[in-house]
Amino acid sequence: MTRVDFYVIPSADPEARLTIACRLADKAWRQGMRVYLLCADEAQRETLDARLWSFRSDAFLPHNAVEEDADSAVTLGLGEPPAGQHDLLINLTLQVPAFAGKFARIAELVVEEPAIRQAARENFRYYRDQGYPLQDHRLPRL
């Protein structure tokens, strides 16, 4: 069954979610996982795309928009994931996607911004009520 990890970030800045998304994607990719980053909108996807190229000073994380290369190990999208890419979903939207159960793992990124925190609570309840194994991780300040 899909495992859901909630990463609680001690920041009110929604952009902190993108920093953690980059770190999680990098770690998963280095472990040989295929990663799908589900973005809330095109602006967020463009910002995340730029960050993935530059978030580390010593390397970059190879990735593509799902429309450009669905076979990439790390893809960014706004809807359904590429076929066969079901290792890790990093959910940057505020709701549980209908296809969430297709993934082995889901990462939900939570900051102290009220709308994001409330959405995360609702998502947590949904996952719990559906019987998903849940884990939360309290991250240190960035």
Image: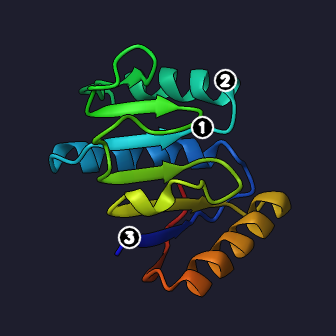
- Picture disc at residue 39: 1
Residue density around tag 1, few if under 14, some if 14–19, many if 20 or more, within 10 Å: many
Looking at the image, residue 72 lies above or below residue 79: above
- Picture disc at residue 57: none
- Name the quadrant containing residue 116: bottom right
- Picture disc at residue 2: 3
Give the residue displayed 71% in from the left and 54% down from the top: 94
Q: What element does badge 2 sit on?
A: helix
Instruction: Estimate the spatial distance between the alpha carbons at disc 3 and disc 2, rounded to whole Å.
Output: 27 Å
Instruction: Estimate the spatial distance between the alpha carbons at disc 1 and disc 3, rounded to whole Å.
Output: 20 Å
Mark 2 = which residue?
42
Looking at the image, residue 51 lies above or below residue 28: above
Q: What element does badge 1 sit on?
A: loop
Give residue 4's position: percent from left, percent from top: 45, 71
Point out the tag, 3 or 2, that comes first from the N-terminus: 3
Q: Is residue 21 left or right of residue 119?
A: left
Looking at the image, residue 93 lies above or below residue 79: below
